[in-house]
Image: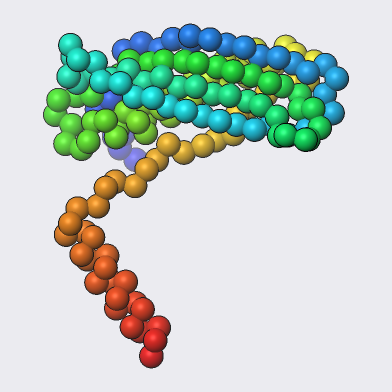
Amino acid sequence: MPKTPLKPSPIQLLSQDFDEINVQSQHDSEGGSNTLEVSPTLIPVKEHPDTWLLMLSVEIGSEPDSKKPPYLASVRASGYYRVEKSYQGDPQRLVRITGASMLYGAVREMLCSITSRCDNGMLTLPSISFFEEAPKTKTAKKAAKKTAKKTSSKKAR
C-alpha cells in the first residue's frame, strides 16, 4: 500500500498555557458523581487578523445533594492559534472546534498526570465534542424545507 504524504493542518498551534490548575482530592470520598462544565471563549487578535486566542475553562464539581465525589477541580488554559490565509472555510469556526479540542486534550492529559499520583486514582475527563453545525445558507434552508414538506406529505398518505 503506497504511503500518503501528510499535509499540514490549516490551523497551527502557536502557544498553549495553563493559567490556573486547582485539583482537590476528596480523601473521604463517597463515590459520588462529578459535574463537568466546559466554557470556551474565542478572541480575535487585532494585530494579527489570522490569529485567535482561545481560553478554555473546565470546572469539575459535584452534583447537588449527592455523595461526595473523588475530585473537585478547576482548570483554565489558553492557546494562540493561527489559521492559514489559504483556508477556504470559516477560520473562527475552525478554531472554535479544532482549537478547543486541542486545548481540552491538553487539559485532560494534565489532569490525568496530576491525579495519577492521588489516592483516589487517575481522573480522566470524558470525550466531548466542540462540533457545531455550519450555518445554513438560504439555498440550503430552502432545500431542507422542500425535503421536509415532501417527507411530511408522504407520511400523511
Residue extending farthest to the front is 65
138 sits left or right of 107 in the view: left
The percent coordinates of residue 58 (x first, y second) are 54, 23
Of 101 and 149, the residue lying toward us: 149
- Image side of residue 74 versus residue 63, left or right: left
- Image location (x, y in percent) of residue 31: 81, 31
Q: Position of residue 65 (x, y in %)?
A: 77, 35
Left/right of residue 32 with respect to residue 76 in the rendered view: right
**Residue 121 x, y percent position in the rendering:** 75, 21
Residue 34 sits in quarter: top right
Residue 56 lies in quadrant:
top left
Q: Which residue is painted at 78% across and 35% down in the image?
A: 66
Display colour scheme: rainbow
| Residue 144 visible in this rendered orientation of the protein | yes
Looking at the rendered image, the quarter that the C terminus falls into is bottom left
Residue 5 in view here: no
